[in-house]
Each structure stands twice: as C-alpha cells, then as structure tokens.
Amino acid sequence: MRYDVIIIGAGVAGLYAAVNLPKNKKVLIINKRETFKCNSFYAQGGIALAKDEADIPLHIKDTLDAGDGLCDVEAVEVLSKNSKAVIDDIISRGFEFDKNENGELAYTKEAAHSTSRILHAGGDATGRYMHHFLLQLNPHPMLGDTRVVDLLIKDGKCHGVTVLEHRELRNIYAKNVIIASGGIGSLFEYHTNAPTISADIQGLCVMKGIELEHMEMTQFHPTVFVKNSFAQKVLLTEALRGEGATIEDEYGRRFLFEYDERGELASRDIVSKSIYDYTQKTGYKVYLSMKNFDFKYFINRFPNIYKNLQDLGFNVPLQKVPISPAFHYSIGGIKTDLNGAVPSIENLYAIGEVASVKVHGANRLASNSLLEGLVFAKKAVENILLNFRSFKDDEFFEFEVQNDIMSLKEDKEKKNKLREIMWKYVSIVRTKKGLLEAKEQINVLLNEKIGKLLKFRLLTAREIVNSALAREESIGVHTIQKEEN
C-alpha cells in the first residue's frame, strides 16, 4: 500500500488537513480508536481569532504576553494573520458558530484576552461541533482501531508507518506523513484529555532521534472536577469565568485577587498555581461558583456542562462545584518549522497539539489551540502540494516489519505508577529534588521487562522531566520551586 499522504490522528488538525487535500490524492487517515475520542471533541470554550485587521496586533500581543517571552514571534504572526481566513473558510463550507440576538457572530472573552474575540458553537461544544463537521466534509478513507507504532525512516526521509491493527503489524507506505496525534494527558493521574491520548508518538520520536522541544511546558487547567471515577476528569471551561463564574474557598472568599489583580481572569497558569498555593497554605477546599448566571442563559450557553454536572448530582448554576487544577494541554512537542515540517526528516510533518511551532511559548493563550490546529494544518498541506512529486523506484524502500512485543499484562499497573509519579513530581509546582526522583523511578521502569507501548510513554515522560531539569528558572507554566538548604 502506497499513499500520497498518511495522516496520523483524526482530531481537528488532522481532519482539516484531510479536507484541504484534493480528492485526486491518495490519502489515508489512521485513527487509534473511535473518531470522537480525541481532545478536539472535548474542546469547550471556543476558538480565538483576530476579528479584523485592527485586532491582529492585539491578538499577537495577547499571545506573546501569555507566552512569557518564549513564543516565536513569526509563528504568532502567522497564526494571527491567517486566523480569520481559516474561520471564513470553515463558515463558507457551512459551519455555523453561535450568534447573538441580532444574528451576528457572538464573540466572548476568556482569560488574558484584551477583547472579546472567541467564537463558540453549540454553547460549550465548539470542538465537538467542529470535529463532527470536518468528519462530514472529509473525502478520504479512514483506518480505525489502528495504532501507529513505528515511523519508516531511511536516509533522513520518512517513507511511511508501521501500524498495529487487530493485533497484527504491517507497513503502510507514503510520500508524506502528517502527525496529528495529540498530546500527553494519560501520563498524569488527573487530566482532562480523551482516553486515547497516551503520548505514544512523542516517545516514538525520542526512539527515532526526532527532536522534541519545550516538553516541560505542560499546562494545567485550573477548574476541573476531579472526583469522578474515570481517568478523564470533567473540564469546566474558562468561558465560565470569562462570563461571570467566580472561584471561592469553602467560606465564599474570592482569594485569587491576592495573587493577581485580574482575579479569575488571570492567565490559567497563574490561576492554577494560585489555587495550588492557597490550598497548600490553608488546607481549604476550592469551588467554582456559577450563581451569577441566569438559569435559562446558563443551560443554553453551557448545555453540556449543565448536563454533566446534573448527572453528577450538582444543582447548577445555584450550587458550587469543588474544583482542582488538572493536566490539560501539552505546549511543547515535535519541533517543526512554520509549515509544520519536521526539519530533520524529509516528508514528515507535525501539526496540532503534538507539534511545537512555538506559537504558545511558555503558556498557551486560551482558545488558541483549535486555531493553531487549523492554521498549521493548512500550511502543512500547502507545503506538501507545492513540493509534491511522484515516487521513483530507486527512492522506494521495502522495510521489514519489526515484530516487537507491544504490551504485557503487567504494563497496566506500571502505567498507573507512571501517572502517580508524574502527578506527584512533575505537575503544577516542581522541585529539582522531585524531578530527580521522578527521573530515577522512570528509569527503573524503563529497565524492567515492558511492552513497546509503555516504553513510548516512559520515554515521553522522561523527556518532560529532562526538559524541566534543564530549565532552572520559573517561566510561564513551568514553576520550579527553590529548595531550602
């Protein structure tokens, strides 16, 4: 099997890439599980954009400010200057964002944005609506229940992938491979990610010598209900705070203003660290209060949150909901250029959360993630089509399938151990001592008899720890606490 393009992952980034690849190209999308089990599907808040030419400098400034000096300015300019074009493209294809009573696009505001510039759909179901819409538009075949377990690389070129399908391994060849496999949520005990997001491809890249960068930049969402029994916790979108929800302790005190004059509207890294610090110092529980919302408005604007919390026994918006920060988004990833191309390997691209094009720097601005997936998916496809060429026989390599042991019965317990290690030592606030302890425990696990899939996770986790150890000063979402002598 030889394709023009293989796309790993069927979230918004992967699907928008597929939609922009013409029907006359032979394209295959490879999806690990059911199509809805991706982070895009669970994106609640919305999608940011520069509303017009005048808003571009402000959107760029807000993104750079949130990124705390680590953004690539050119990448942020590409993101903002192309934002309206990709949104207009999706609207022209038939996608409908929520509108106000005058029939105009309803822009909302989230933390660290200087103006209302975020569009949403289905109230709090933007990702779900957009994902479903792009699935309907997709003209190319999809291979489901299939996991990519190797990249076929020779002489600095990517020639395809090895997949695990129905417990059998086989190679699929392609002129171009786009990685759009998402983040790393399953590495942490508490996270908001889809259950399929397990950091496989990042670990595979470590094995292949493909550079990852800014892996220490892991973003924790401040408002998550973590008391459910599932690995994936219940995200309570930042848009709630943008429209009037407040964070209080068990005595009704809004303590965030002690940490930042913006209170609930400070950037999410500040809010997460403030909650962490406050609970450590006081021992108090922390809640999200939605009492400022009109009931009818709340159930129309946030229908999924309303249903999810009702199912959990909360009478919202009247009743407060206990919250905790939880892992939410991987800012770092596979190093790419501004076209999504991986510099060290020809014909290989990475887009969306798995990639690091450095638009987010040290802290992602709210609702820039879906936008990044769309903008750089289009850039990657444009680059592929611009440089498209046919295979020559002397450029094609037949790779032997590597029959590695994928998993062992004991791996599940070790995966859970890894989640505990990462949450305890590599989460909101870190210390050098804790990071060294995490690295030691991860190395112990790596030296045990384990399957290849667990090895991927462990390699990704160790890369995060190594990156955190290398950055000795706190910046953005990376907080390294100085230890007393």
Image (tube, helix red, strand yellow):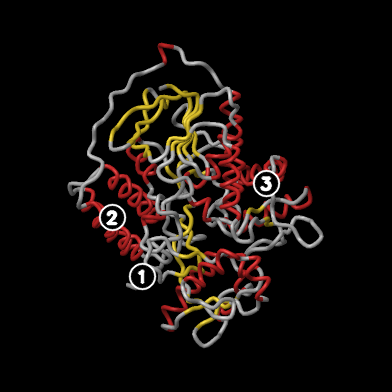
Residue 162 at x, y percent in the picture? 35, 31
Residue ranking furthest to the left: 449
Amino acid identity at mark 2: Lys
On residue 51, the disc is none
Circle nearer the N terminus (2, 1)? 2
Circle nearer the N terminus (2, 3)? 3
Q: In this rendered view, identify the residue nearer to me: 137 or 208.
A: 137
**For the residue labelled by badge 1, is the local secondary structure a helix, a strand or a loop?**
loop
Residue drawn at x 65%, y 42% as measured from the top left? 78
Give the mark toward the camera: 2 or 3.
3
Amino acid identity at mark 3: Phe
Residue named by callout 2: 415
Residue 154 at x, y percent in the picture? 36, 24
Please tell me how many numbered marks the rendered image carries: 3
Amino acid identity at mark 1: Glu
The quadrant of the rendering that contains the C terminus is bottom left
Relative to 394, say whether 446 is above or below: below
Can I make out residue 483 in this image? yes
Q: Residues within 10 Å of mark 1 (few under 14, many from 20)?
A: few
Residue named by callout 3: 95
Give the mark toward the camera: 2 or 1.
2
Circle nearer the N terminus (3, 1)? 3
Relative to 315, say whether 367 is above or below: above
Horizontally, residue 446 falls left or right of residue 170, namely left
On residue 483, the disc is 1
**For the residue labelled by badge 2, is the local secondary structure a helix, a strand or a loop?**
helix
Give the mark toward the camera: 3 or 1.
3
| C-alpha separation, residue under disc 3 versus residue under disc 1 | 52 Å
Horizontally, residue 307 falls left or right of residue 445, namely right
